[in-house]
Image: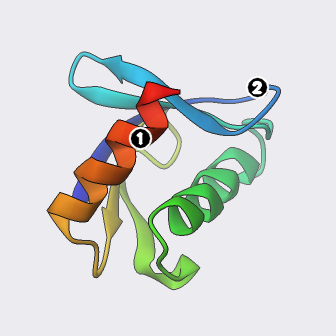
Amino acid sequence: MTLDIRIIPNAKQTAFTDRRAGALVLKVNAPARDGKANKAAILYLAEVFEVSRSAVHILAGEKSRHKKFEIIGLDAGHAEDRLAVLLEK
């Protein structure tokens, strides 16, 4: 499954906040330097969707705030249910 995500670095905590222009907004508590924000996003996605870190890949946008992630082994129904719960908070 692929997800379009806009990353906002240097947040107080890592969490999904909303959807903007068809992309999920993910705030991460890591700086946008040396791949730290990317690593924080991968770790968070793996934790949220209950997959291994090796199942989460950046397909496009490694140096951009707009990224396309691939999550191997993630069921679309499970992903939407989990996102609905996270964005509700």
Q: How is the image coloured?
A: rainbow
| Front disc: 2 or 1 | 1
- Residue 52 visible? The answer is yes
Mark 2 or 1 closer to N-term?
2
Question: Disc 1 marks which residue?
Answer: 85
- Residue 67 visible? The answer is no
Q: Position of residue 60 (x, y in %)?
A: 34, 51
Residue drawn at (40%, 44%) of the image: 61
Crowd around label 2: few <14 · some 14–19 · many ≥20 (10 Å): few
Which quarter shows the N terminus? bottom left
Q: Is residue 60 left or right of residue 40?
A: left
Q: Position of residue 68 (x, y in %)?
A: 32, 48
Q: Foreground residue, 84 or 20?
A: 84
**Judging from the image, what secondary structure is the residue with disc 1 in?**
helix
Q: CA distance from mark 2 to mark 1?
A: 20 Å
Crowd around label 1: few <14 · some 14–19 · many ≥20 (10 Å): few
Does residue 53 lie above or below 49 as drawn?
Answer: below
Q: Quadrant of residue 18?
A: top left
Q: Position of residue 69 (x, y in %)?
A: 36, 56
Q: Is residue 25 left or right of residue 8?
A: left
Instruction: Give the residue type at disc 2.
Output: Ala
Q: Position of residue 50 (x, y in %)?
A: 49, 73
**Judging from the image, what secondary structure is the residue with disc 2 in?**
loop
Q: Which mark is residue 69?
A: none
Residue drawn at (56%, 77%) of the image: 53
Q: Quadrant of residue 37?
A: top right
Instruction: Give the residue type at disc 1.
Output: Val
Question: Disc 2 marks which residue?
Answer: 11
Mark 1 and mark 2 in contact (Cβ < 8 Å)?
Answer: no
| Identity of the residue furthest to the top in this view | 21
Q: Is residue 14 left or right of residue 71?
A: right
Does residue 68 lie above or below 84 as drawn?
Answer: below
